[in-house]
Image: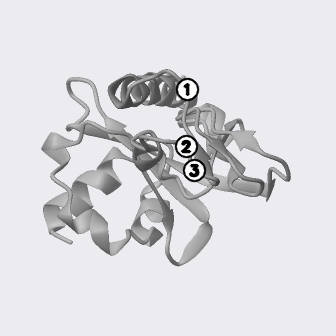
């Protein structure tokens, strides 16, 4: 991973301490990211701490191009067919999990969190690109890939805004 990519992702972590971001392990594919060209919501689980994950999305002006939040898995995955609140893809049982993000700032230091049910693998950007429903993935019927991508960005931004407020 290039130092600049690594540094920028760690600096973009809006709800983590420097120590937490320093201990975070980024998966190998992240080293190929061009952070200036990120236009999708990206997510991954920490390879060394699978109960932790990261949600990275295009930032606003002044966000160094991206904003990221740390997530932690809840107790268990949905036991029935469930829909991801971000990409709105319906998944087979066990594939959607409650992921929780500590709020940024003083609220987070006091233990306040925001949670939502999300694709357990955090691969929402790939899931919205599914053209036809499969046994494991069922995208919102009657919507184009671009409409699903835009919806994912909007819902992820609202979730991040709730973490940052």
Quadrant of the image containing the N terminus: bottom left
Q: Is residue 128 above or below residue 146?
A: below
* Residue 43 placement (x, y as % from top left): 44, 52
Q: Which residue is mark 1?
A: 141
Label 2 – label 1 distance at C-alpha: 9 Å
Marks 2/3 in contact by CB < 8 Å: the verdict is yes
Residues 20 and 93: in front is 93
Which numbered tag is attached to residue 134? 3
* Residue 115 placement (x, y as % from top left): 69, 37
- Tell me if 129 is positioned left or right of 119 in this view: left
Label 1 – label 3 distance at C-alpha: 12 Å
Marks 1/3 in contact by CB < 8 Å: the verdict is no
| Mark 2 residue element | loop
* Residue 142 placement (x, y as % from top left): 50, 21
* Residue 154 placement (x, y as % from top left): 44, 22
The answer to which of marks 2 and 1 sits earlier in the sequence is: 2
Label 2 – label 3 distance at C-alpha: 4 Å
| Mark 1 residue element | loop
Quarter holding residue 139: top right
Marks 2/1 in contact by CB < 8 Å: the verdict is yes
Quadrant of the image containing the C terminus: top right
Give the residue displayed 23% in from the left and 42% down from the top: 38
Q: Which residue is mark 2?
A: 133
- Tell me if 58 is positioned left or right of 50 in this view: left
């Amino acid at each position: 991973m290039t130092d600049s990519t690594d540094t920028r992702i760690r600096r973009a972590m809006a709800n983590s301490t420097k120590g937490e971001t320093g201990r975070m392990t980024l998966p190998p594919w992240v080293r190929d990211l061009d952070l200036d060209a990120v236009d999708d919501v990206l997510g991954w689980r920490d390879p060394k701490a699978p109960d932790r994950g990261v949600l990275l999305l295009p930032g606003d002006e002044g966000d160094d191009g991206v904003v990221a939040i740390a997530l932690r898995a809840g107790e268990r995955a949905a036991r029935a067919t469930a829909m991801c609140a971000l990409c709105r893809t319906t998944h087979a049982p066990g594939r959607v999990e409650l992921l929780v993000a500590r709020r940024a700032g003083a609220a987070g230091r006091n233990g306040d969190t925001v949670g939502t049910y999300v694709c357990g693998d955090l691969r929402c950007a790939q899931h919205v690109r599914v053209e036809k429903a499969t046994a494991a993935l069922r995208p919102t019927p009657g919507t184009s890939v671009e409409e699903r991508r835009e919806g994912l960005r909007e819902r992820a931004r609202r979730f991040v805004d709730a973490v940052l407020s």
